[in-house]
Image: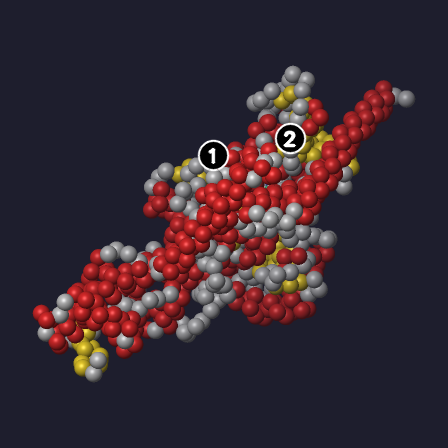
Amino acid sequence: MSNARADRDAHADQRGREIADEQDYLSMLYAKLDDLREETTRRLRTTLRDSGGSPQARTERDISTRMYTDRLTQISAVEHGLCFGRLDLDGGESFHIGRLGLFDEEHDYEPLLVDWRAPAARPFYLATAASRDGVRRRRHLRTSMRRVLDFEDEVLDLDAAEQGSDLGLAGEATLLAKLDARRTGQMQDIVETIQGEQDRIIRASMNGVLVVQGGPGTGKTAVALHRAAYLLYTFREQLAKRGVLVVGPNETFLRYIGQVLPSLGETGVLLSTTGGLYPGVTATGADSPRAAEIKGRADMVAVLTAAVRDRQRVPRDYVEITFDRAPLRFHRKAVTQARTKARRARRPHNLARRVFRDELYAALTLQVADRYGRDLLDPRDLDEISAELRADPAVTAEVEALWPELTPQQVLDELLSDADRLADATRKHLDDAERAALLREPGAPWTAADVSLLDELAELLGEDDAATRAEQDRRQREELAYVQGVLHIMEQDEEIADEERLRVSDVLDAELLAERQQTRSDLTAAERAAEDRTWTFGHVIVDEAQELSPMAWRVLMRRCPSRSMTLVGDVAQTGALGGARSWGEVLGPYVQDRWNLAELTVNYRTPAEIMALAANVLSTMDTELRAPVSVRTSGHEPWTRQVPEEHLAAELPELIAAERASIGDGTLAVLLPPELLADLGPALATSVPGSAIGTDPEGLSSPVALLTVEQCKGLEFDGVLVVDPERILDGSEHGANDLYVALTRATQRLGIVHPGPLPTLLHPSGK
Ligand SMILES: Nc1ncnc2c1ncn2[C@@H]1O[C@H](COP(=O)(O)OP(=O)(O)OP(=O)(O)O)[C@@H](O)[C@H]1O
C-alpha cells in the first residue's frame, strides 16, 4: 500500500471515529429532548386536570398551561437539526450549539447544548481566522433525522490567508451546500450558517431605529426574522407582554416567510401587511398605482382633517324645527359658537361632540326659557327644559346632524365616493386629475392604502368609549373585591396553609391578581394585538420597508411609540410610486437623524452570472448603491429569446416547460407585466402542467408560479423567466427598479423573453 493511500485510509478512519463520537453526543441530546418532551407533557396533563377552583388557581393554571404548551411547540420545532455546530476553544473546552439550550440537571445544570442566541454561541458566527475570539476550531455538523451524516471543520488558528474566500465566509462548504439546494416555495431558517455581518445585525441593541440596507439576496428578510427570534429569546419578559410585529409587503410574501419563526420555536410574533393592521377590515380591493400613491401622501392627514371638519356643520342662517308646539331655531351664531368651543377642546371629533352638544343645548335651553320669560325661571326649571330638549327626537336629530358621531369607514367611504365632498376636502392638495383617480363607487372594497387612511381617521375621530370604560372599571372593581376576598380567606384558612400557595399569595397582591384575571386568556400578546387597533408593540420589524408610503409609516409609528424598530429594505428596489428614495427622508419626521444604519453587502441568492446583468440595470438608476457581491456562480449564463408579442401565447408554454425541465424538481417563476399576466395568466395556468397564479394560496408551492414583479418582491425561485422587460421598464417611474427586482429572484437560472428588441441594458456588456 502506498504511503498516500495509507494516509488517506487513516484519515478516513479518523473521520469515521469522529462522526461516531458526534453521533453518540447527538443521540444523548435527542434522548434528553425526549425526556424533556415527556416531562413537559406530563406536567401539562396534570395542569389541565386541575379544575382551578379559585380565581388564583385558575390564573396559575392558565399561566402554566401557556408555558407548557409553548415549551412543547418549541421542542417539536427543534426536532429537525437540533444540533448543528460545535466550538473548540483554546483552553481545550468545547461545546455544542443548536436550536435550543439543554442542560444536565444532575450535574449542576452543565450546558449540554447552547442555544444559538445565547451570548456563548456568538463566536460560532463571528470568529474568523483573523479575529478568533478564543476559538480554535469551528465545526459544522450535517445531520438528517437524528443521524450525523458528516461535518465540516474550520481550524481558525492557522494563517488567515489560507482560509476560505476573500468574502470571509464562515463554514463555506456548509453555506454553499445550503445555497445550492432546491427551493421549496417556503423560506427556510439560516441558524446554521449565519454570517458575521448578519449576526451583528441580528444581535444589535433593541433600542431605537435600526435600518438594514442591503441589495437583493443579502439576507435582509432572513436577518429580520432571526432578529425577531433573538430579541424574543433575550428580552422575553418584556416582549412577551407587548409582542413583536413583523410587517411584509403582501400576503404571498407572508406565506413565503410564515414557517421561519415557528421553525425557530417562536410563535409570539404577529405577521401582517400594513393593509392587515385595522381589525375588522380586510383589504380585498386594489388601487391603481397612481391612486395608491396619492392615498399614501403625507398631505392626506390634512385632507382627512378637512373631511372631518366638513362634518361639523353650521346652518347658512338658521334651521327651524318645532319643539313643544312652538318654533325652535338653530341659529348660525349659536351653532358656530358651540362648534368653536368644541374645536378648541382639541379632542378627537367624537369626543369633542360632547362639548358641542352641551354648548348648543345650553343656548337652546335659553331660547326656550325666553318663551316663558327667562327671569321668572330658576335653575331647576332650566335643567328641566334642557332635559326635555335632550329627550326630544326632532331636537336630538338636528343636533346629531350638525356634529354627528362618525366611524372611520363612513367618513372615508363617503369622501371617496362623493365628488363634492372630495373636492371640498382636497381643494388645497389635489388637482382634478388626482381627484378623478381617487373617486370610486360607494361601498367599494377597501384597499391596503385605505387601511392607513382608516387608521388615521380613527385617530382624528376617536372613540367615545365612556360607556365601555365605565363597564370595564365596574368589572375591574368587582374583580378586585372578589380577589381581595379570596386572598383574605386564604390567609385565614389553616387548611390551605400549604407552602406553595402561600408563597404565591405573598408575591401577588390583589390588584395584580385582578389585573391578571382581566388579561387571563389563552391568547398570546400577538394574538391580542391582532384584535386591537390601539395595541403598541415591544418591537416592530418592517421588511421591504422601502415600499411603504408616508401614511403607512404613520400607522406603524403609532404602533411603536418606543421606536424600537428594525427596518430592512433596499432603496434600489423601490417599486411603489410613493415609496422611499432615501431612508433619511422616511425617518426624518419621526426620529430626525437618530437612527442607525447597517449594511449587508454579500448576495447569497443570485449567482454572479445573473448579478452581472442586474448590475447593469442598477448602474442606470439614480443611486449611489453598488450591487452586492455574489457568493457563488451557477455555471449558467442568462439566456434571451425574442418572441413577437402575437406569438407569446403560443410559445410561452413550450419555453416554460423547457426551463422547468432544466431545473428538475426546483421552482420556476414566470414574471410578467401586470397586463400580460391578466391576458395570458389564466390560459397559461391551465395549459402549462404544474403552473399556478403565484398569488393563489397554493401558488408558491406549485412548481411554476406566474407573478408580476410587484408580487414577487422578496421571493426567490430556482429559475426565473422574465417576460417583456421593455414593458416592465416602461411600466412605471420605477421601471428600472422593477426590472432589477425581477432579474435578482433566481438562485440558478434566468431566461429573458422579449417581444421587441432586447433593451440595451440587458446586453451582456450593457452597451
Ligand atoms: N447566512 C446564510 N446562510 C444560508 N442562507 C442564507 C444566508 N443568508 C441569506 N441566505 C439565503 O439567501 C437567500 C436570500 O435571502 P433573503 O431573501 O433574506 O434576502 P433579501 O436581502 O431579503 O433579498 P431581497 O431584497 O431580494 O428580498 C435566502 O434563500 C436565504 O435563506
Q: Is residue 515 above or below residue 319?
A: above
Q: Secondary structure at mark 1?
A: loop
Compared across the picture, whether 465 is left or right of 402 comes to right
Nearer to me, 378 or 82 = 378
What's the amino acid at mark 1?
A: Ser
Residue found farthest to the right: 1
Front one among 270 and 480: 480
Residue 487 position in % (x across, y down): 51, 42
Q: Quadrant of residue 425?
A: bottom left
Q: Earlier in the sequence, mark 1 or mark 2?
A: 2
The answer to whether residue 224 shows anywhere in this view is no
Residue corresponding to mark 1: 205
Q: Are marks 1 and 2 in contact (CB under 8 Å)?
A: no
| Figure quadrant of the N terminus | top right
Q: From this viewpoint, is residue 56 visible?
A: yes
Q: Is residue 628 above or below residue 23?
A: below
